[in-house]
Amino acid sequence: MPQNTTHLGRNVCIIGAPGSGKSSLARQLASRRSFRAVHMDQLFFEPGWKPTPKPELAKRVAAAISEDGGVFDGNNSGTLQMRLEKAHSLIWLDLPLWITFPRIIRRLVRNYGTVRPDMADGCPERFDMEFLRWAWTFPQHSRPRQEIEFEAFGKMKYRLASKRDISRFLRRIERTGTTWDAVEPK
């Protein structure tokens, strides 16, 4: 095994603030090994931005992660434990608000009225003040929980706190290789 190999295991869970690049990173990692990118927003929302009822959501997530070979991205706290139990590694995109919030605004403007590839069918990009408030206050209400989950995760984990960290992580995967086998906890 090459020195400094990035160990990801057969299933990867990605969490982070809105606009941190979870879905983009999931697609990139999945494409490198023909894994499935599993976007929680596709499972959480039904057409018209209606939340999936909790029992149905749990079934959808369980089915989506049942087979190995997945990169799961998203923050839905109701299914996070299920995904963490299945994951062999955790990537926390812990980028600052000054990076994530402008990305959200650019995404909204660029994709307004269309359905993004990581979003559920029937959920076109829209101006949603409630979501923007939630994203703006994410560092206060949700980041602390993500930090706790990250610290408690007993397998391989990677905290990427800048665009440079993400670029280095992806370059390291390209340069040194990635092991996708199951890994033991640290």
Image: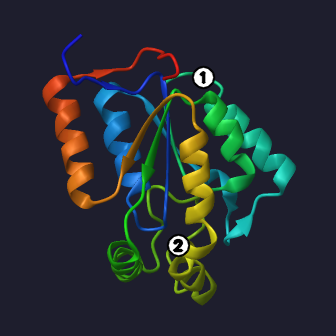
Q: Earlier in the sequence, mark 2 or mark 1?
A: 1
Report the disc number at residue 139.
Answer: 2
- Which residue: 35% across, 74% down? 103
Q: Are marks 2 and 1 in contact (CB under 8 Å)?
A: no
Decide if residue 79 is on the left or right side of residue 75. Answer: right
**Element type where label 1 sits in the image:** loop
Position in image of residue 153 (x %, y %): 57, 37
**Element type where label 2 sits in the image:** helix
- Which residue: 36% across, 27% down? 34
- Which residue: 49% across, 75% down? 125
Decide if residue 98 is on the left or right side of residue 64. Answer: left
Give the residue at mark 1.
67
Position in image of residue 182 (x %, y %): 48, 15
Vertical side of 168 occupied by 136: above or below: below
- Distance Cα–Cα, label 2 vs label 1: 33 Å
Q: Around disc 2, counting alpha carbons within 10 Å, would you say few (fewer than 14), some (14 to 19), or many (20 or more)?
A: some
**Viewer-proximal residue among 172 and 74:** 172
| Amino acid of disc 2 | Pro
